Every structure is written in C-alpha cells, then in structure tokens.
Amino acid sequence: MKHFLRVVTQFFVFLYCKCLWRGLKFVIRKFTGRCELQRICYNNKHGARRTLKIESSLRYSKNELLQSALSVHPDKVEKTIDDIMALKKINPDTNPQLGISLQASLLQIVGYRSLVAEVEKLRREPYDSENPEHEDMLMKLWKELRPDTPLTGRISKQWCEIGFQGSDPKTDFRGMGLLGLHNLLYFAEHDKATALQMLHDSLQPKHNEINKPEWEQKNIDKAIGYSFAIVGINITDLAYSLLVSGALKTHLYNVAPEMPSLLHFQQTFCYLMQEFHRFWIEEDPS
C-alpha cells in the first residue's frame, strides 16, 4: 500500500512540475516576447552550453517538427531552420542572427549523430588480411613507428615491438575492428614525435633515467612497461564509449564550429593517449 501511494504521489508531482514548467514558459514568452529558442540563442554564446540547451529544448518539445529536427539530414538543416522560424512566427529579416545561431547548433547536433554512426561502422568492420587497404594501413603503422627497422614478414614476432600481443596483429583488432587501426595510424602520422616517444617509454619503463647496463644489473622486469598498440586499442574503446554515451558532446560542441567529424574524434583519442602516458609516468611504474 505504501509503495502504491508513493508511486501515485510521484506521478502527481511529475504532472504538477510539467504543468508548472509549461505555464512558466508561457508567462516568460508573453513577458519577454521571445520563445525559448530565442532566449537560448540570445543569452548564450556559440558553443556547448548553447547547443546542449537547444538540443534539450528540441528533444522535450511537444511539437513533432521540433523533435524531428534532431534527426534531420545535414543537407536539410537550412530548410528545417526556416520551418522552425515559421512555426515560431519569427521574422528572419528582423532576427537574422537567430537563424545563423540555430543553424550552427543544429549542425553540431546532427553532426554528432552522424559521427556516432561513422565510428560505429568502423568499429563493426573487422580487420581483413585479404583486404589490400587494411593491409596497407597496417604496414604504414609499422613504418611510422619503426622507420629504421624493416619488417621481416607479415606474420612476425616483430609486431610485439610496437605493442601487439602476438605475431599477427589481426587478432588484436577484434574488439574495436578497423576503428582501432584508424586511430593508431592517425596518432602515428599526425603526432609522430609523441607517438614515438610513448612507444620508446613503453618499452623502457625507467624512461632512460638509468643506462642499459645498470638496468640489466638491477634486473628490472621489462613487463612493467605497457603494450603500446594494445593500450591504443583500449583507449579507442574508452573514446568510443564516451562518444556513444554522449559524454563527448560538451567537448566536441566546443571544438567543432559546425559538424563534429572523425578528425575531431581522432584528436580526442590522441589526447587520451597522452593523458594515459602522463598518468603512467607519474605513477612511476618501476
């Protein structure tokens, strides 16, 4: 009985709050002469704060047009903004900045959805050793990380030198598919100095603080290092989880002027890799 009364009470509180909020919005609009979207755009600068508020406003609107705006194709964003302006009876000639602001934020919103779909597609695509493009990417990764060391064969224990678990990296990509390889290659190509330094440190846990003879004399276990490629795949998993959960919205809405792209996701991956390495060094793995 107590549980039933609690549920009924919560239901009426919800209805009360919902009606109160709608009534409050109506009063504010009558008082200011501006709808909620106008108030958001005029009171917030371009960036995550404004876009997140617009996204929330559209999602919880009772109007189907406003709700559907969150899932329109990027090519239809401009028309959707025109439809919203017409629905809200806003004159675009007297409110030119409103249309620009709404368009920028809506492009970020639909761009984020498109990015999630693109990343998910890469994650679901398995590494195929019979695919020349996949093999070419893998070979590029080796050349970027081991520029002075020729690979003796496609199947080789040398792969362990850059942090794979066995003689065929193909098996390590099962969890994240091609997404893991894309991220590792992007890091190696676009932030090569950092990637090489991280790889070097991962193989030498003392970070060159002692020379090799002293290292061997102290019998320091090299296993306290970390596997660079495997860590990269795990960090890819972390970045993917943050993206899908929506936790990256604030960051991406702030760094992407319009539509977030795979480039922004990969830059986030590079940042996470560097943060992991910084944490690993600070923890002093020796």
Image (tube, rainbow, N blue to C red):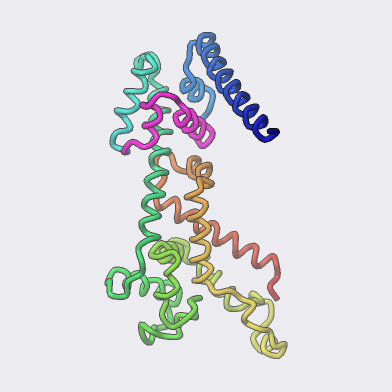
Count of marks, rendered view: 0
Task: Name the foreground residue: 52 vs 124.
Answer: 124
| Residue 71 on the magenta span | yes
Identify the image quadrant of residue 225: bottom right
Q: What quarter of the picture does the N terminus occupy?
A: top right
Q: Residue at x 47, y 50 (%)?
A: 244
Q: Please tell me whether the stretch drawn in magenta is mainly helix, strand or loop.
A: helix
Identify the image quadrant of residue 211: bottom right
Q: Residue at x 43, y 33 (%)?
A: 105
Decide if residue 101 is on the left or right side of residue 200: left
Q: Can the viewer see residue 168?
A: yes
Decide if residue 144 is on the left or right side of residue 31: left
Residue 104 location (% of width, % of height):
40, 33
Task: Name the foreground residue: 50 vs 68.
Answer: 68
Magenta-highlighted residues: 46-73
Question: Most extreme residue toward the front, as rendered?
Answer: 1
Residue 186 location (% of width, % of height):
42, 62
Residue 131 location (% of width, % of height):
28, 71
Give the answer, above or below, for where 238 lies relative to 10: below
| Residue 277 on the magenta span | no
Residue 37 location (% of width, % of height):
46, 23
Q: What quarter of the picture does the C terminus occupy?
A: bottom right
Q: Residue at x 63, y 63 (%)?
A: 278
Q: Residue at x 48, y 10 (%)?
A: 33
